[in-house]
Amino acid sequence: MNNRLYAQLADAWKALSSVTSVLISAHIDPDGDSIGSSLGLLHLLREQGIKAHILQHHPIPKNLSFLPHDHAFLSYDQPDIKEIIAGTDAWCILDLNAPQRLGPNILPFFEHFTGKVFLFDHHVNPILKADHSHVIIESSSTCEIIARMALESNIEINAQSAECLYTGIMTDTGGFRHSRTNAEVMRLAATLIDAGADPVKIYDRVMNAQSLSSMQLLGMALSNLTISHDGALILMILRKEQLVGYSSEDLEGFVNYTLSIEGAKIGGLITEWEDGTVKMSLRSKPTHEVRSIAESFGGGGHVQAAGARVRHGNLKEIVESIQQLAKI
Ligand code: 5GP
Ligand code: MN
């Protein structure tokens, strides 16, 4: 392991653990890594007697609500939210690189925040200004960064924190299968298991939690794939009529099926929503990349997993552009 990458985190913890109250926020459309790192950090801080809360645009997804989160979440529309934020010393931003990714319900509060800002992330090109910025793109996940901060600082990772941090490492590596999976990540996962994370329970709760109707929607989507480039580009497209009654949470994991087809190099889930937004979730095999496609629609992400949302987008035109932009 490149220890230099993580040694700086001891300073971050030193600064963070010297305050009395911390707010934690991660990205819109929360996933295992954003929720896992937020709760993992919250439990580390609370163990040290530091007041910690999470504030985010969307509620905790159903398949992650087994993670310990008693009294963890504040609501952006609770009457005393402004006073609470004004009394907060430090705001930790996790798993995102651009302020807009906080979501419209959180961004205005963040823009007026006068305390210290800490950023912990593993996405490239951070454009969020922070007093303490710890962006480690070599990391598998933001959960890995938080766990290594604890280890570098000789802080004991309690069982609650271990469960949350293991969850995000598992989901961001696609269940220890994607390119960031290596011996160091597996050793860290083992450390978290030793600290109390139950890998069998976590996999079951996170991955086997799709509703029957979302599985049926997946079945329909799989029978209508849009295939081009001799089978190398596979797009799963869902129009707004097909998504009535569903939310992005119901589509968790759908995109991965596009890449599980033999010969597929780039896969994508393109969804059109009632409010006119078109969202794309793109994935590629290690030989290919999708970040540049997402960036040309104002989004971003990782080389092999990226996304974008286009307001008032034209679904047909967006699909055609993706087909042209895909470097196959
Ligand atoms: P997902 O496809 O799972 O929603 O996201 C995959 C990756 O792309 C995530 O790491 C996320 O950070 C990034 N991503 C997804 N949507 C957006 C977006 O609208 N803007 C940016 N900048 N990144 C995104
Ligand atoms: Mn992440």
Image (cartoon, rainbow, N blue to C red):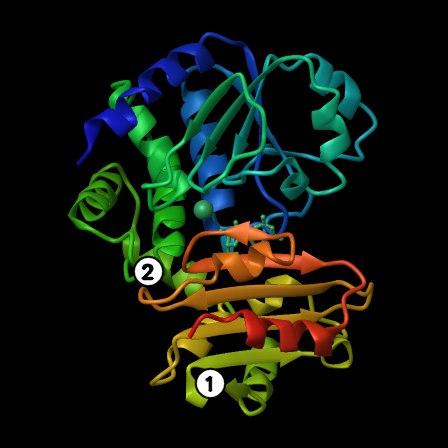
| Pointer 2 or 1: first along the chain | 2
Tell me if residue 317 comes above or below residue 307 in the rendering.
below
Q: Amino acid at mark 1?
A: His
Q: Secondary structure at mark 2?
A: loop
User: Residue 62: x percent and y percent?
Assistant: 57, 57
Tag 1 secondary structure: helix
Give percent across and percent down for residue 35. 51, 44
Identify which residue, 259 or 221, lies in the foreground.
Answer: 259
The image shows residue 162, relative to residue 114, as above or below, that is below
Relative to the observer, which residue lies in front, 108 or 154?
Answer: 108
Q: Which mark is residue 175?
A: 2
Q: Is residue 189 left or right of residue 169?
A: left
Image position of 63 with respect to 198: above or below: below
- The residue under the point 60% across, 48% down is 60
Give the residue at x 21% y 39%. Answer: 191
Which corner quadrant of the image does residue 146 belong to? top left
In the rendering, at what x and y percent does residue 215 appear?
A: 55, 80
- Asked whether, in this view, residue 273 is left or right of residue 190, the answer is right
Counting labels gives 2
Q: Is mark 1 within 8 Å of ligand 1?
A: no
Name the residue type under label 2: Gly
Circle 1 sits on which residue?
229
